[in-house]
């Protein structure tokens, strides 16, 4: 670490890089995301980017890990309340709030997963964990599973660019699911 780089600066730089990479991945697709573009968008030298992420693959891995960690933190906050159905409610609410802030996941993500299928492993592990926690907290684990899978179906259809429902129908469905959770 150089004299001007403190642990706080290191974390701040990493966060700036991840935020810039996420913005670029969402607007242009992760397959088209270059390290140069991420460094420029974050206001960091390419050497600074490479210090944190020695390759595009490592950067994409970190993006996935960061997203899942933030999502996990949201679920944990609701889990700690101990209220039945708090976790599936948080899962659905997070899905809806994400839709208000971001565009749907870019289909270019498929190219990344096709190029490196191992990148799916942490996603699968986290999603399995989320479902187990949702079921453990649910008053009706089977209904909670159907709610979880409904959200997954919408996300998958958008990822594949095969969505057959519009935004109004998605909100109607999520309202319907939430209304049926005690």
Image (spheres, rainbow, N blue to C red):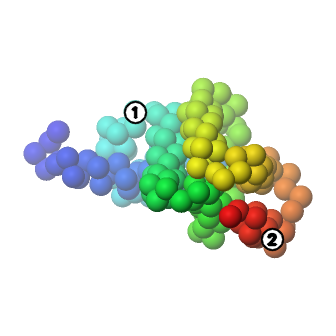
In the figure, residue 131 lies in which quadrant? top right
What is the quadrant of the C terminus in the image? bottom right
Name the residue: 70% across, 62% down: 181
Q: Which mark is residue 54?
A: 1
In the figure, residue 175 lies in which quadrant? bottom right
Q: Position of residue 149 (x, y in %)?
A: 75, 47
Q: Position of residue 69 (x, y in %)?
A: 47, 46
Q: CA distance from mark 1 to mark 2?
A: 44 Å
Which of the two discs, 1 and 2, sits closer to the camera?
Answer: 2
At numbered mark 1, what does the secondary structure look like: helix, strand or loop? loop
Disc 2 crowd rating (10 Å Cα; few below 14, some 14-19, many 20+) is few
Name the residue: 21% across, 52% down: 8
For residue 147, side relative to residue 5 (left or right): right
The answer to whether residue 167 of the structure is visible from this angle is: no
With respect to residue 7, does 123 lie above or below? above
Q: Position of residue 174 (x, y in %)?
A: 75, 65
For residue 81, side relative to residue 166 (left or right): left
Q: Which mark is residue 172?
A: 2
With respect to residue 48, does 174 lie above or below? below
Front-most of 153 and 43? 153
Name the residue: 75% across, 46% down: 142
């Amino acid at each position: 670490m150089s004299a001007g780089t403190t642990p706080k600066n290191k974390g701040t730089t990493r966060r700036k890089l991840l935020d810039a990479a996420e913005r670029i991945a969402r607007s242009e697709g992760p397959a088209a995301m270059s390290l140069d573009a991420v460094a420029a968008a974050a206001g960091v030298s390419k050497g600074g980017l490479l210090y944190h992420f020695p390759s595009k693959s490592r950067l994409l891995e970190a993006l996935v890990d960061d997203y899942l960690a933030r999502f996990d933190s949201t679920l944990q906050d609701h889990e700690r309340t101990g209220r039945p159905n708090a976790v599936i409610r948080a899962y659905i609410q997070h899905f809806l709030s994400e839709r208000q802030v971001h565009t749907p996941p870019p289909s270019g993500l498929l190219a990344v997963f096709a190029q490196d299928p191992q990148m799916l492993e942490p996603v699968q592990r986290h999603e399995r964990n989320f479902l187990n926690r949702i079921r453990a907290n649910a008053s009706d684990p089977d209904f909670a599973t159907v709610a979880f899978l409904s959200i997954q179906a919408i996300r998958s259809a958008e990822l594949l660019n095969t969505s057959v429902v519009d935004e109004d129908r998605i909100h109607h469905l999520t309202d319907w699911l939430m209304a049926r959770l005690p």
